[in-house]
Amino acid sequence: MADTTIFTVNDMTCSHCVSTVRKALEEALPGAEITVDLDTHKVSFTGDRAKGEDAIKEAGYTPEPA
């Protein structure tokens, strides 16, 4: 079972943000399990932590360890 990484992304404020973050992670981590929760500002994913963190940053958001 792959390790799950969880970040808090406080600058994710709308459904468009959720879509943008999800798409960035799907492109960076094909086949990863991804959960993006706008209410809690939590993003979780399986796969390479650094790649996921970089994808969130490249999408314009600020991931912080949860």
Image: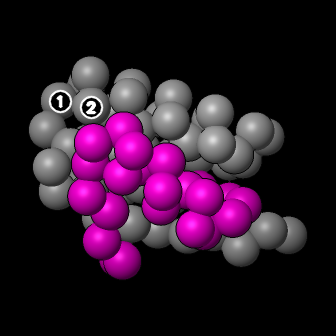
Q: Is residue 34 above or below residue 14?
A: below
- Res 2 → quadrant: bottom right
Please state which amino acid type lies under the numbered disc 2: Cys
How busy is the neighbourhood of tag 1: few (under 14 within 10 Å), some, or many (20 plus)? few
Q: Position of residue 36 (x, y in %)?
A: 42, 44
Helix, strand or loop at disc 1?
Answer: loop
Whether label 2 touches label 1, CB < 8 Å: yes
Colour style of the rendered protein structure = one colour
Quadrant in the picture for the N terminus: bottom right
Q: Is residue 41 above or below residue 64?
A: above
Tell me if 64 is positioned left or right of 49 in this view.
left
Span shown in magenta: 45-66
Q: Nearer the viewer, residue 32 or 56?
A: 56
Question: Residue at position x 15%, y 49% from top?
Answer: 11
Helix, strand or loop at disc 2?
Answer: helix
Residue under label 1, please give it: 14
Question: Residue at position x 35%, y 76% from top?
Answer: 66
- Res 30 → quadrant: top right
Residue under label 2, please give it: 17
